[in-house]
Amino acid sequence: MANIKQLKHLEHLEDEMLNYGVEGCKAAVSFLKELKKMLGHQESSGFMQTKWDGAPSVICGTDPQTGMFFVGTKSVFAKTNPKLCYSEEQIDGWYEGDLAEKLKFSLRYFSTLGITGVVQGDLLFTSDIKRETINGELLYTFRPNTITYGIPVDHPIGTAAGRAKIGVVFHTHYTGDVVADMQARAGANVKGSADALVVQNDTPMHRVGFSKTEMKKFDTYISKIERMCHVCGDFLDELVAKTGTTGDAKFHIASYLKQFFNSEIKNARSIGNVDEAMYDMLNFYEEKTSKELAKIKTVANLTKKRNLVYGSQNYVVENVYKFKAMLALYKELQAVKQMVIDKLDHLEEFRTYVQTEKGYKVTTPEGYVLHKDGSMIKFVNRLEFAYNNFTLQKQWR
């Protein structure tokens, strides 16, 4: 919801109400209304980018203080000892293994692209690109993280990938006079070279739109969510105020809501029946707090923390209809988000797979990032990508 200073983590549309309460809810509605303009091909200040499952995230460009080209990870933004690497020797001093090699490739080939300012991107491949036949199609493939990407060898991008030494998606540029204090801005105007394939990630919204029936359904979602936000608003603010990782808040159920939703994704479940979700949420809370209580050594402290848990359980009972309204709202946000994702997935030229014990399995792209007035929110099919992300072993951690 808030403007992002440095792009370290993006939030899901449906989680904003858990992060910011009623303001997060309003922001979600605002994003949806902007998206309606885009899908209706109306004038809009927002734009969409395809989210790539690349790794590592590389920040590079010209250090405004030294005038020298550097590469690094998100640690370039550290207030103390920022790791800006101007040479391969500095990379070896701070990093090791595959990460060091990836950064050396980045320094070697990105320094020749004429990058002005500082940009951020997701690395796609270096020497690990392969030539494979999948489902009868000859592809160049690479797996930077969870998803394996494929592009036909005779596609223009495939031809470029076949000769490139490195591939990247640049998605963000930064403004400011000191790297540690720079402000993130959407988009990065960087052209590739024969050695460096730069994949563009602006989603071509002009090629997608809703039919009249779909637009009516989308409108209905927005109106319903807006009404539900109004009903839930005060309670959402109350939950945000009770959320925390220390002290008494550590044992309040509000602090376990995002964990619960993530747990449902890990188990390949979405919010379906609200009553069942309530039951699952309470079981999840009891399981988690039981583990926390088991760590406590003194009787007095254990008694105090048990009372906090009992109090939180009573809080749920006293506010059961409010919790159900919150879960219903979360469910609606998931549904409208998926409606958009299903439309956008058809635009992608790259094939996407996950690698299983039985070989490659077709999957969807990671998702999309909607930009509006300097703020960003992500649209990710969490039951598809996030489930894979949680459960499949990654190459990069």
Image: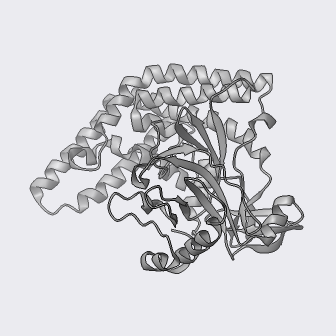
Q: How many marks?
A: 0
x, y (%) of residue 374? Answer: 52, 36
Quarter holding residue 149: bottom right
x, y (%) of residue 201? Answer: 69, 49
The relative height of residue 195 versus residue 215 in the rendered view (above or below) is below
Would residue 252 appear left or right of 379 to someone viewing this image?
A: left
Q: Residue furthest left?
A: 300
Quarter holding residue 196: bottom right
Quarter holding residue 47: top right
Would residue 235 appear left or right of 1 to someone viewing this image?
A: left
Residue 316 visible in the displayed image: no
Q: Residue at x 43, y 62 (%)?
A: 75
Q: Residue at x 29, y 50 (%)?
A: 245
Residue 165 visible in the displayed image: yes
Q: Nearer the viewer, residue 9 or 288?
A: 9
Would residue 314 appear left or right of 274 to someone viewing this image?
A: left
x, y (%) of residue 266? Answer: 53, 56
Q: Nearer the viewer, residue 268 or 32?
A: 32
Q: How is the image coloured?
A: one colour
Q: Residue furthest front?
A: 67
Q: Residue at x 41, y 32 (%)?
A: 323
Would residue 56 appear left or right of 317 to someone viewing this image?
A: right
The relative height of residue 31 versus residue 262 in the rendered view (above or below) is above
Q: Residue at x 72, y 23 (%)?
A: 42
x, y (%) of residue 206? Answer: 78, 34
Q: Nearer the viewer, residue 321 or 397?
A: 397
Q: Nearer the viewer, residue 291 or 334?
A: 334
